[in-house]
Amino acid sequence: MPDRRPHLLDAALAVVADKGMKGLTHRAVDAAAGLAEGTTSNYYRNRAALVEAVLDRLLELDADLLRNVGPAGPPSNVTELAGQLAAMVLALAGEHAGLTRARLALSLDRPETVTAGHYLLVGGLEQALAALGLADAAARARDVADYGDGLILHLLTVRRDEEPDAAAIAAAIRRLLC
């Protein structure tokens, strides 16, 4: 019998993306997963256990996303880095928008859950900027991360009907870096 946990947790992330944390119930996950009522509670006895498992699944999916959507290697210049970051923003607001919505809902409910990932991302960006020889890499990395976070939020909300322009996003990132 296959392990149903990944399927249940992906369904739980879809519930959170669609209905927020208040919508995350065992019954809602069962329905989203297309499984018999009570299945989720057999694996996750209470809501706290379900939320913890969802957070672990989100970290797992984020790692997969960075491996598959992220850059193949370190950028050789600011233009290449800006293009890589623009592609990541577009992926998070497009193809992976459901995962991003779930991450936002979870972070509003439990802000501490995104802190480590945020610092890991900013730290990696800071290292990339320092390797490119940019001064004040730490401040610039924070600025770019803040821009990316804000842009993703806007692309998912107030600008959801717009077709984002990768070149314009990359140009904005270059302006922050130069």
Image (spheres, helix red, strand yellow):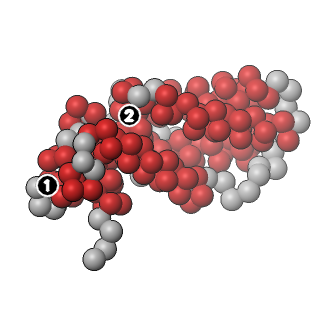
**Mark 2 crowdedness (10 Å alpha carbons): few <14, some 14-19, many ≥20:** many
Q: Is residue 74 above or below residue 79?
A: below
Tell me the quadrant of the picture where the N terminus can be found: bottom left
Residue 100 or residue 63, whichever sits in front? 63
Q: Residue at x 84, y 36 (%)?
A: 130
Which of the marked residues, 2 or 1, is nearer the chain's N terminus? 1
- Residue at left offset 33%, top offset 54%: 10
Q: Is residue 27 left or right of residue 120?
A: left
Looking at the rendered image, the quarter that the C terminus falls into is: top right
Name which residue lies at 17% across and 54% down.
30
Q: Quadrant of residue 55?
A: top left
- Using the rendered image of the protein, determine whether residue 174 is visible from the camera's viewpoint: no
Answer whether labels 2 and 1 touch (C-beta < 8 Å). Answer: no
Residue sitting nearer the eye, 91 or 170: 91
- Point out the frontmost of discs 2 and 1: 1
Identify residue for label 1.
38
Question: Residue 112, image x and y in percent?
Answer: 49, 28
Residue furthest to the front: 45
Q: Is residue 20 above or below residue 87?
A: above
Q: Which mark is residue 106?
A: 2
Residue 32 in the image, given as x and y percentages of width and height: 19, 53
Identify the residue shown where x is 19% and y is 46%.
26
